[in-house]
Image (cartoon, rainbow, N blue to C red):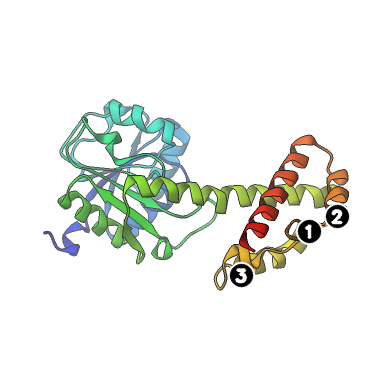
Amino acid sequence: MESFESFLGMKVVLIGAGNVATHLSTALRKAGYRILQVYSRSIESAKTLAQTLNCSFTTYYSEIREDADVYIFALKDDSLPDAIAGITPNDGLWIHTSGSVPIDVFKGYVKRYGVMYPLQTFSKERYKDFNNVPIFVEGVGEDEEFAVHQIASSISSCVSFLSSEKRKYLHLAAVFACNFTNHLYSLAWDILEKQDINPSVLLPLIDETAAKVHVMRPDTAQTGPAVRFDTNIIAKHLSMLDDKLSEDIYNLISESIHYKAITKQ
């Protein structure tokens, strides 16, 4: 097996220029990898990230360099198969960063491939230290898995092996814990802004709710009218909502909270 240091300085081509690609490539460059090129369908996105990384860029699969050691695909899930099929196969290690796409999406195209899934929410406007980001890795073979693990370990102290089958459930859980929760924040913001109340008053409540799950199970920490099924408050809240979709969301989540509470007893 190669030493950890032998992976540093590897040449990398980045397929994608979105949130994950931006943070991941920045961390890799800081760790000592050489970013050769950025691909994106958007010339503006490709150029912006390439300028940050001081490398070349392209918007054409046919122009992607074939001399890199590693090709990292940080794309939307539905764009991944077309990108893999559109790029000329080579001897590099091909890695995708998706939580829900299985490793065998590369099968039949290249011999060396793996997965490096960072479990975090990323926005270009907000810096995130990758050292504390959990990364879940997988490789088609022992050598590939070792290589992906070494690359991930050079930017994060929280690296674990996880199969495609398990990873898809981790991604599902992440959607509930992050994406759905953030959408509920957005709905709460809308309610307060319509009443000319500064939504920032919710921040201490949000912070404490998140802090609780560090020391207790979420179902143990659950509070509110739905737990005790306070029909008077629930009915009042529903009457205050001004669209059917928000009413449905309130009802469905309240039912789920109450059902979980009574089944725990």
- Say which quadrant the C terminus sits in: bottom right
User: In terms of depth relative to the viewer, which is nearer, 2 or 16?
Assistant: 2
Helix, strand or loop at disc 1? helix
**Residue 67: quarter of image:** top left
Circle on res. 233: 2
Residue drawn 88% across the image and 53% down it: 232
Residue drawn 33% across the image and 45% down it: 164
Does 65 appear above or below 156? above
Going by the numbered disc 2, the residue's amino acid type is Ile
User: In terms of depth relative to the viewer, which is nearer, 41 or 253?
Assistant: 253
- The residue singled out by tag 3 in the image is 212
- The residue singled out by tag 1 in the image is 225
Does 3 appear above or below 11? below
Image location of residue 253, percent across then percent down: 69, 48
- Answer yes or no: do the residues labelled 1 and 2 have beta carbons within 8 Å? yes
Residue drawn 44% across the image and 48% down it: 169
Going by the numbered disc 1, the residue's amino acid type is Pro
* Mark 1 and mark 3: Cα distance apart in space: 19 Å
Image location of residue 121, percent across then percent down: 51, 52
Q: Going by the picture, which residue comes out furthest to the bottom?
A: 215
Left or right relative to 253: residue 106: left
Are there few (<14), some (14-19), or many (20+) residues within 10 Å of tag 3? some
